[in-house]
Image: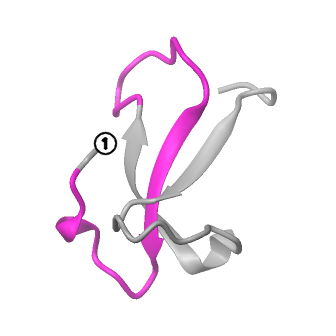
């Protein structure tokens, strides 16, 4: 990814929370997925709070 890549952080828990302080979140999912070429923007990172588990999240 280059410096001009658009990246969006979304709450992957399904609760629709605002992702305000990135230090309090962990990445669980990505769109496009791992090892996929970026052909569309923005890149979407699905995140949950650091105290939560990614295993309960459905990949986007």
- Residue name at image x 73 percent, y 25 percent: 2
- In the image, 15 versus 51, the foreground residue is 15
Instruction: Report crowding for label 1: few under 14, some 14 to 19, many 20 or more residues within 10 A (C-alpha).
Output: few
Residue topped by disc 1 = 60
Q: How is the image coloured?
A: one colour
The residue most toward the bottom is 51
- Residue name at image x 34 percent, y 64 percent: 14
Answer above or below: position of 47 versus 41.
below
Answer above or below: position of 7 versus 49.
above
Secondary structure type for disc 1: loop
Image location (x, y in percent) of residue 16:
47, 66
The residue most toward the front is 16
Quarter of the rendering containing residue 21? bottom right
Q: Is residue 57 left or right of residue 35?
A: left
Q: Is residue 49 left or right of residue 41?
A: left
- How many numbered discs sit on the rendered protein? 1
The residue most toward the right is 4
- Residue name at image x 61 percent, y 30 percent: 42
Magenta residues, as a range?
32-58
Q: Is residue 33 left or right of residue 16?
A: left
Quadrant of the frame with the C terminus: top left
Q: Is residue 44 magenta?
A: yes
- Residue name at image x 64 percent, y 27 percent: 1
Q: Is residue 39 magenta?
A: yes
Answer above or below: position of 5 versus 20.
above
Quarter of the rendering containing residue 31? top left
Main secondary structure of the magenta stretch:
loop
Image location (x, y in percent) of residue 19:
62, 67
Image location (x, y in percent) of residue 7:
65, 40
């Amino acid at each position: 990814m280059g410096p001009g890549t658009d990246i969006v952080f979304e709450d992957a828990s399904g609760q629709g929370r605002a992702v305000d302080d990135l230090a309090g979140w962990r990445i669980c999912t990505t769109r496009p997925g791992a090892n996929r070429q970026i052909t569309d923007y923005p890149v979407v990172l699905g995140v949950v709070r650091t105290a939560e588990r990614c295993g309960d999240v459905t990949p986007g």
